[in-house]
Amino acid sequence: MSVGALLFAVGVIIGAMGSHALANVLNEHQLASLATAVGYQLFNALGLLVVGLLMRTLPAARLRLVAWGLLLGIIFFSGGIYVMLAGAPRFLGYVTPLGGVLLILAWLALSIEIWRSGR
């Protein structure tokens, strides 16, 4: 759960930087991309917190895979956008869709685990 909370804090920091310090540096499209990355980071960090709480009542072994999927999804999706906005080579942007796929798979896996538990 601490990783989810940390990712939440980092997302808030990046979001604040984007709306203040970077508002005059990035163009409108880049600011929209930053907002998308921050939004996905915050939403999925909240998901990590929920998974951490669910680990107290559901089998933790399979939920660890869900947590790793969410974590790697955030890193690849939001992180891919962040590094692109920071000027990284365009080819690094190819990790962004992989992050999206990981996020989808993690949420589907969570859905299956909750359904399996009968709760």
Image (cartoon, rainbow, N blue to C red):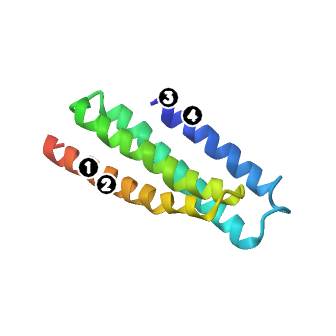
Measured Cα–Cα span from mark 1 to mark 4: 23 Å
Residue 109, label in figure: 1
Are discs 2 and 1 less than 8 Å apart at CB?
yes
Q: Which residue is mark 4?
A: 6
Measured Cα–Cα span from mark 3 to mark 2: 22 Å
**Quadrant (top left/top right/bottom left/bottom right) for the N terminus:** top left
Q: Residues within 10 Å of mark 2 (few under 14, many from 20)?
A: some
Residue 111 placement, left or right of 71: left
Measured Cα–Cα span from mark 2 to mark 4: 22 Å
Q: Which residue is mark 3?
A: 2
Query: Of helix, strand and loop, which one carries label 3?
Result: helix
Callout 3, which amino acid?
Ser
Considering depth in this image, is 22 or 9 the residue closer to the camera?
Answer: 22
Q: Residue at x 21, y 44 (%)?
A: 113
**Quadrant (top left/top right/bottom left/bottom right) for the C terminus:** top left
Q: Is residue 81 above or below residue 10?
A: below
Q: Which residue is mark 2?
A: 105
Question: Most extreme residue toward the right, as rendered?
Answer: 24
Measured Cα–Cα span from mark 3 to mark 1: 21 Å
Residue 82 point in image, percent of width and height: 64, 54
